[in-house]
Every structure is written in C-alpha cells, then in structure tokens.
Amino acid sequence: MKNRIIYLLLIIFVWSCSKENASDTETYEPTPLPLSIPQIFLENIIPPVIPNNNPQTVEGVALGKKLFFDTKLSGDQTMACASCHAPQNAFTDNIPTSIGIDGDFGNRNSMPIYNLAWNYGERFTWDGKELSLERQALEPVENPVEMHSDWDDVIDRLQSDAEYPELFRLAFKTNTITKELTAKAIAQFERTLISANSKFDNYSLGQATVTPQEQNGFNVFMDEERGDCFHCHGNTNNPLWTDNIFHNNGLDTTFADLGLGGVTGDSNDNGKFKSPSLRNLAYTAPYMHDGRFETLEEVIEFYSSGLQQSSTIDPLMKKVDEGGVNLSMQDKADLKAFLLALSDPTFLANPDFQE
Amino acid sequence: MKIFLALLVCIPLVFTSCGEDNDDNLVASANVSFKFSHKWDNTTINSSNLTTETVTNANGEVISMTRIRYLISGLQLVNSDGTTYSFDGYKFTDLEDETTYNFTPEINNIPTGIYTLKFIWGFSEEDNIDGEYLDLNSASWNWPTMLGGGYHFLQFDGMYNVDTIPSPFNYHNGTARVSMGVFEQNYASIEPETPINITSNAIININMNIAEFFKTPNTWDLNVLNTPLMPNYDAQKMMQENVLSVFSIDGVTQ
C-alpha cells in the first residue's frame, strides 16, 4: 500500500514536470509548484489536501507571501498576518491572546502555521469554525479585535498599488483583484509552510540519534500507563504529532469559551478545542487555546495533576479523578526533553518564509 | 495477496466453463458489498446518537459512549461447495462517520449461490505490520511498538457509572503483550453461521452488537477493568473472546 502511493506520487510528479517543459507561448499559465513533501510524510501519511480550484503555483505562492507580510490588509495599515504569525515564532506570537490594531485582545492564542495542508478534516482554528484555509484567510481582516479593516478598502488599496495588479495577473490570469483571490494566494503561501526537520524526524529516518532522556520521554509519551499522549498527538507513524480533531482535555469545570460547541451548537461539543501539533513547542509558548500556560513544565504538570472534571471531558483523560496521570519527576523532565526534540530550527530559518 | 491472485485465476475458469456450456444452466454472477450497522442490543447506534445514548452493560454499569472506531480485514465468502472468494483490503469504521459503514471491495463479482461470511477482527499477524498503511497512520490508528506495534483493532472510549460518579473507560483492543518484549497475536476470526443466499447483486447486512463486548463469555466489570487496558494481557485476551459474539448477519438486500 505504502509503495503504491509513493509510485503514484512519483508518476504525478514526473507528469507535472514534463507538462511544465512543454512550450506554451500562446496562452500564459502560472507555473505549477507542487508542494515539496518531506520524506517523513511521504513514507508515513496520506498526501496533503490541495483544493482543485486553488492549485499551488510559483506566482500564487509569491503573491501570497507578499500579502502575508503586508500591513495594507489592516484598517490603519499597521498590522499584517505576520504580526501575530511571525516566522521566528513558528508563525505564532509569544503572548497569551493576540492584540488587534485598536489595542483590543482577542480571546484565543494565535495558532502557529505549519503542515496545514495535512489537516485532512479541513476544520481550522481552535474551534474548527473555518472550513478551509481560503475561508480562514478572509476572517482576521475584518475582525474588529484583529486587523479591523474592510475588504472593500483592502481591495481598493491593492488595486491602486503599483505592483499588485500585475502580481494577481501572474498568479490568477486577471488583474481584477478580489478578496477571494487574495485569500487563495495567502492560502497557497501557508501551504508551503512545512516543518518536518526536527531532531526526532531525523532520528526516525535513521539520520540522527536521541539522548537516553529523550528516548525515555518518547516512551512516556507512548505508554498508556504513563503519559498516554499518543491517542491525540500522533506517533512516529503519524509525524504530524496531532490528530487534528477536537477534544475537551480537562482544562476547566465550566466553559467561559465553548470552543467547538460554539460552532456546532451541540452542547456535547462544549469545551472542545483542536489538538495542536506538538512540533516547534520551543518557539510557540504560551500554550493552550487561551495561552494560559507559560511553560511546558506547566503544561505537563496540568496533565499530570491538574485535570478538571466536566460534562464533556474526553474519556482519554483517564485519571481525571486523581487529577491526571501523576508522572514521576523524572518522567516529566524526560517528556519535556522529548517534546523539545520535535522542534525544527530550520523551519524558523528558512529564507523562503521570511519577509 | 496470494488469495487475491488465486481469485484472479479462478475468474477466467468460471467464464471458460460457462462458455462451454451450451444449455440453459449458465452460472449467473453477482456483485456484492457489505453494509455494517451498529446496535446496543435493540437500539441502533449511529453518528446522531452515539454520544447521547445512555446504555447499561451486562454487569449493570450505566454507560455513555464517546467514540467507537474499529478495524476488520480479510472478508471472505465461502460457497456451499467449499469455494472461497476473498476480498482485498480492510475496513476502518468510525461510528461518527456514516460514510465508513459500507464496504465495496474493488473486485467483488461472485457466482450466485449460498454462502457463509468470514472475516478477521483487526489484522491477521501477517497483515498487522507496523506503519504499513498510510491511511490508518493518518488516523492515528497505530498500536505502540512497546506493546507489539501494528494497529488498534478497536478504540471504544466512554464513561461508566454515569448515573453516580462518572469515570472514563478506554476499551482498546490490539496485540497482547505477554511480558516485556514478548507479544501474542490477538486477532479473531469472525464466522457467523447464518447462510447468505446470493441470487443477484447484493448488499450483505452485518450487525455489530456493541453490548456483546461486555457480555459473552466474559461479563465485563468496568469498575475493575477500565483503563489502562492496552498493556493488560488478560483484558486483551478477554476482549478477543468477547468479540466473537459481537457480529451477526442481518439479512441480504438484493
């Protein structure tokens, strides 16, 4: 099965290359830019989700990158996507909840952006409200506690800019700019943000070693009698390190923020939030949907002894009546060491991802 | 794969024999697919009531269910003359996703006749290869290497004693660990006795009675066996025994 998929991908890859080489001077077409799928994903998980109506192109990604870093998208032109999703923080920020152009704080922690094309269920954000990356990209621009702008104004600014109309023509064969095309370009750029080069990735590929402490931390992670982290946060065969679905992990007895329940209207979903990927934790503090924990030690202590019972708590939070899994001091320290080995410094330094 | 190749070899033989037959008793053939439904005794459980239904198990604990996902493989139909037709692939079912309830094998053409069904609960030892199936990896369906690796057969999570003080249970089934580094396969061969009469293109209806996981032959006491059960050898072997009465044939639609 694994080999069949790899061969299929190879065939698609070769075919797309040969197509690219065909002489095509009469009608302009943007240049296809298939995602560069890391070996560890290719060998272990199914291919990424790329919408048929928004294929990756060289010109689309370049435009999306420019838009991502451009303050023209905000009401007073002081804020870009990158303001709360900064490359040096694995495309999040370092405060509990983000601050908008008017000085207002939102109620959620900015989510880091990487490996989003592998979110097979295509529910994005902490509460699953956004059903595609393209739709998500529309939201912060007009959100009053975020960029607090108006799409009509943004389109006017982009349309009257010296460069953008030509960049849209190159990406989408029209120089008439719309919010939908703007969102498509941003989504294309976001799909290129791939992180798969941590120490532990290289260990899994047989190209690096881990310390005994990191190895024991991994065993804590995989042990149902100790950490039991793997049921929601992936494993060596699912190197996304998330299941990309929604759980109530026992943070609170009552819910100030309904999470998924606020989106579905189903009270059984109250208090459920997306399992975040455990990659790049070294750069993405603070943690949880509201950024309540400043350090990884606090997060691990929460799962070890701080769980709160509630009506929708996930049964995978199995020792809730004892406060949690009650890890030993050594196991807590080792688990932290393992988690940090999932961080990928080359992702932060990738020149393709910088302004 | 060997069985699959054998089946391929069989198909031309069937057609050849038909072609040489000049009278009227041509052997008709039929396409078959499988439709799984799920019940707690007489109550149908599907995506709309999985998490809202409250049920009572054989030992008397009141239960709510959060998720049920399971894996079966190696579906076979055995003709009354003893010929076995094997269907490629495996079936991963998530009760929250009703599109996973049905299974149509890629090659599913068989002669009409009377059959019995056989399939494997989980993966056979030969098929239960760690990391081998990319779709199952993507569903985080893996069974930890320290417990023998491969894949879960069942993930059944819920709360028991919901009428008093609710506590979680994680009834997860897969390879059994005898001792550190020593593992024992734990799949089961499911062979409902009910004959299946295939007269034309057919959907074979199979019912899973979830209550049976807690009932026969081992009456399950969730107050004792709740979590963690994956490393618990005795619990794993009791699950392997109890799954034998979980599935039944629920008629044929044709």
Image (cartoon, coloured by chain):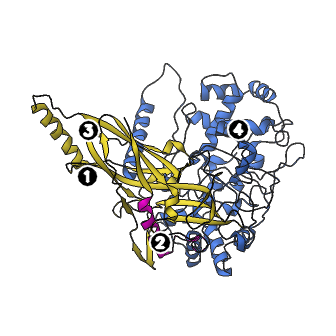
Chain colours: A blue, B yellow
The amino acid type, in three-letter code, at marker 2 is: Leu
Q: Is residue A90 left or right of residue B83?
A: right
Judge whether B168 appears above or below B12 on screen: below
Q: Earlier in the sequence, mark 3 or mark 1?
A: 1
Q: Work out whether residue A308 can be spotted.
A: yes
Q: Residue at x 65, y 39 (%)?
A: A131
Residue plotted at (30% across, 50% down): B116
Alpha-carbon span between mark 3 and mark 1: 20 Å
| Residue depth check, mark 4 versus mark 3: number of the one nearer the observer | 3
- For the C terminus of chain B, give its image quadrant: top left
Q: Nearer the viewer, mark 4 or mark 2?
A: 2
> In terms of image quadrants, where is residue A284?
bottom right
Chain of the residue where label 1 is placed in the rendered structure: B
Instruction: Name the residue carrying label 4.
Output: A137
Q: Which mark is residue B147?
A: 2
Q: Amino acid at mark 1?
A: Ile
Q: How far from the left and from the top, in percent, is residue A25?
A: 48, 21
Few, some or many C-alpha atoms within 10 Å of disc 1 (few <14, some 14-19, many ≥20)?
A: some
Mark 3 Cα within 10 Å, few/some/many (few <14, many 20+)? some
**Which residue lies under the disc numbered 3?**
B112
Q: CA distance from mark 4 to mark 3?
A: 55 Å
Give the mark, 1 or 2, whose residue is nearer the N terminus. 1
- In the rendered structure, find residue B3 and report the number of the disc placed on it: 1
Residues drawn in magenta: B219-245
Quick check: A181 left or right of A21?
right
The picture places residue B14, in percent across and down from the top left corner, at 17, 39
Which residue does the image show at 76% across and 66% down from the upper left? Answer: A308
Position above or below: A24 against B39: above
Chain of the residue displaying label 2:
B
Quadrant housing residue A143: top right
Graded by Cα atoms within 10 Å as few (under 14), some (14 to 19) or many (20 or more), the crowding at tag 2 reads many
